[in-house]
Amino acid sequence: MNGTMRALLAFLLAVGALASPGSSPEASADDEPIYGETMFFPVVGENHYSDTFGAPRGGGRSHHGVDIMAEKMTPVIAVADGTVGWIHNTVGGDCCAMALHHDDGWESWYIHLNNDTPGTDDGDGYGFAEGIDSGVHVTAGQLIGWVGDSGNAEQSGSHLHFELHEPDGTVVNPTDHVDVAIVVTEPLDGGEPFYEGHFVDDDNSVHQLDIDKIFEAGITKGCNPPLNDRYCPQDEITRGQMAAFLRRNLALPASGEDFFGDDDGTLFEEDINALSAAGIGFGCSEAEYCSGIPLLREELAELFVRAYEYDNPQGVDFFVDDDENQFEESINKLANHGITLGCNPPENDMFCPERSLSRAEMASFFVRALEL
């Protein structure tokens, strides 16, 4: 093991960052540790894989690696110190794969790196981190690229095809090695996952532009303080979070009055009290606000009408599924101003008043409401 690897291992052991995605196989006959115990796991983020080494492939080929399934743009790191060998890095053409010649003679291959512009499947993206090219020396744990579906992986889902070669060139089954490899939670060179906009987790969302707009408007800060590089677009937005969103947008002052008994000491207590003092906030009962439960679409309509004073002077009834709903009047006011189109395109004759909202959907409601 070289000096860089020893230092990295010592650091990881000290901070408790080592983990294994699977159980260790039995030791080899000579009781030497297998190579995987001295290398990093190549994918940094949620993933899954199984042993398919040797499985038949088209054209009489067999599978020479392990397919580590992960979302596009999941970071890929160098498993060891080494020099980049062959590389396929032509944007819009022969992209994206590479080989790494380890300093100790082994070699690892990284295939199906991203070749798409984030959020698309256009083949016009670039799957390598800055500075990665043939002949460049990298260190173990350094960001080299991102998971994708380039090459012949278009129909099989985004993943990293990872191969491991002994110093004499023999291809070995990498499964046992990745089972015991060192797992880290971020690239060790400080390299950040490539993403567009303000958050790392919304590049595949149709609401991405709206999410960025409400960030720029100061309505949202993110969902993982203090780093706040994630928006959590698929999470349901809660009543408490909505209070914070509205208070930021309206710049409401703090209130000295405590309106509800179930939010004492909670993260959103001040936001809830400020919203309630302004005549906008309302509880789930007379005494409770229920800050941690998901916000419903009908409640959104009522909050937006109270906050932005929408009207429906012609009394148009837009939807068939909100008759006798306590918030029907506000739902129609929201529709009259184009803030909602409905929930069942293309007919859009339903509002789905009792359905919850994702944080991504909420961003688009704000953008339409504020004409951002």
Image (cartoon, rainbow, N blue to C red):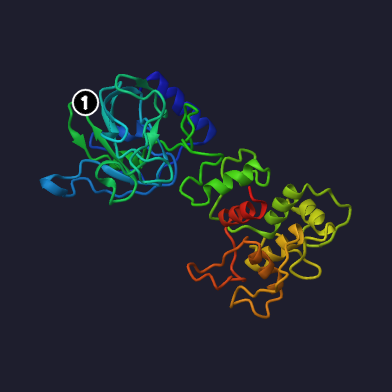
Q: Quadrant of the N terminus?
A: top left
Q: Residue furthest bottom?
A: 324
Nearest the eye: 133 or 19: 133
Tell me if residue 299 comes above or below residue 165 in the rendering. Answer: below
Q: Quadrant of residue 67?
A: top left
Picture coordinates of residue 248 (x, y %)?
73, 47
* Mark 1 nearby-residue class (10 Å; few <14, some 14–19, many ≥20): few
Nearest the eye: 43 or 1: 43
Please give the name of the residue rendered at 62% of the width and 51% of the height, measured from the top-left corner: 367
Picture coordinates of residue 72 (x, y %)?
40, 44
Horizontally, residue 350 falls left or right of residue 93, namely: right
Tell me if residue 342 comes above or below residue 2 in the rendering. Answer: below
Tell me if residue 86 comes above or below residue 185 in the rendering. Answer: above
Nearest the eye: 16 or 170: 170
Is residue 296 visible in the rendered image? The answer is no
Please give the name of the residue rendered at 33% of the width and 45% of the height, measured from the top-left corner: 159
Query: How many callouts does the rendering have?
Result: 1
Which secondary structure, mark 1? loop
Horizontally, residue 57 falls left or right of residue 236, namely: left
Picture coordinates of residue 181 (x, y %)?
37, 37
Q: Amino acid at mark 1?
A: Pro
Horizontally, residue 267 falls left or right of residue 189, namely: right
Please give the name of the residue rendered at 40% of the width and 46% of the height, measured from the top-left corner: 120
The residue that label 1 is drawn on is: 167
Horizontally, residue 320 falls left or right of residue 30, namely: right
Tell me if residue 334 comes above or below residue 157 in the rendering. Answer: below
Q: Quadrant of residue 146?
A: top left
